[in-house]
């Protein structure tokens, strides 16, 4: 081979990319695609949350009735009560499902009625649903402090009670349903009641209901 041909071959030589460097391109492309997908998915979720972000429901106690409030023989107490509570869904685009909801009444931090299971409830957007559960009807053991406190409060004609709801809550937006969230509602009230009275009792002051989800 002549010197001229050698110089042409040397001058026209082009370095080929190594197999190792070319094999990195698909991986880099895949990583870029996944990154873009995650960013778009995050933006979609953020926009959806800003549009549909759910608010917890509101509970308002409007009525109370006491049919029985008797300490039969210590440590047992027999109580039957009924309450009317308005449950409001403040969301415009989100419906609510209530599952496994139970209700009970407590006094001085101790339950004086057994829990009562309520039927499942579906609540549409911007709606208000009344609940009027009858609670009690069975004997419950109580402490001496509770028994003595009730005797004193009945003498003065004012009894402080707490109505409690517990259960599970789900949100529904369009065709999407969330997982179950625990819901705990406590309504503190002061009622006008004296021993032996049967029927609707006045609510003294403005009962306050706190909702935790």
Image (cartoon, helix red, strand yellow):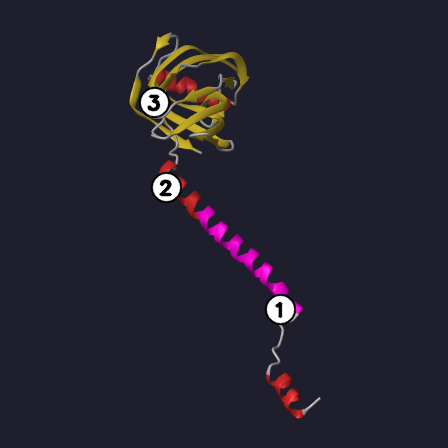
Determine the secondary structure under disc 3: loop
Camera-side residue of 115 and 194: 115
Image location of residue 177, percent across then percent down = 48, 31
Label 1 environment density (alpha carbons within 10 Å; few <14, some 14–19, many ≥20) = few
- Asked if residue 74 can be seen in this view, the reply is no
| Sooner in the amino-acid sequence: mark 2 or mark 1 | 1
Camera-side residue of 43 and 150: 43
Image location of residue 42, percent across then percent down = 45, 47
Determine the secondary structure under disc 1: helix
Instruction: Identify residue for label 2.
Output: 50
What's drawn in magenta, residue-wise?
19-42
Instruction: Look at discs 2 and 1 and give the one toward the viewer.
Output: 1
Instruction: Look at discs 1 and 3 and give the one toward the viewer.
Output: 1
Instruction: Identify residue for label 1.
Output: 21
Determine the secondary structure under disc 2: helix
C-beta proximity under 8 Å, tags 2 and 3: no
> What secondary structure predominates along the stretch shown in magenta?
helix
User: Is 34 inside the magenta-drawn segment?
Assistant: yes
| Numbered marks: total | 3
C-beta proximity under 8 Å, tags 1 and 3: no
Instruction: Look at discs 2 and 3 and give the one toward the viewer.
Output: 2
The span from disc 2 to disc 3 (Cα, nearest Å) is: 21 Å
Q: On residue 127, which mark appears?
A: 3
The span from disc 1 to disc 3 (Cα, nearest Å) is: 63 Å
Residue 122 lies in what quarter of the image? Answer: top left
């Amino acid at each position: 081979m002549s010197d001229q041909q050698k110089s042409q071959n040397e001058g026209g030589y082009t370095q080929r990319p190594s197999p190792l460097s070319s094999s990195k391109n698909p991986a880099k492309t895949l990583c870029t695609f996944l990154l873009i997908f995650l960013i778009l998915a995050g933006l979609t979720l953020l926009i959806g949350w800003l549009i549909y972000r759910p608010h917890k429901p509101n509970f308002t106690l409007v009525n109370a009735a006491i049919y029985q409030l008797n300490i039969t023989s210590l440590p047992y107490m027999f109580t039957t009560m009924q309450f009317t509570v308005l449950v409001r869904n403040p969301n415009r685009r989100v419906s609510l499902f209530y599952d496994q909801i139970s209700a009970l009444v407590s006094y001085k931090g101790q339950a004086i009625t057994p829990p009562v299971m309520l039927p499942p409830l579906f609540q549409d957007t911007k709606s208000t649903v009344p609940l009027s559960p009858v609670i009690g009807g069975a004997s419950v053991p109580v402490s001496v402090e509770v028994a003595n406190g009730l005797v004193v409060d009945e003498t003065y004609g004012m009894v402080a009670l707490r109505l409690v709801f517990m259960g599970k809550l789900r949100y529904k937006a369009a065709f999407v349903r969330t997982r179950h969230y625990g819901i705990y509602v406590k309504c503190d009230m002061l009622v006008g009641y004296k021993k032996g009275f049967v029927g609707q009792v006045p609510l003294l002051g403005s009962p306050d209901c706190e909702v935790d989800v």
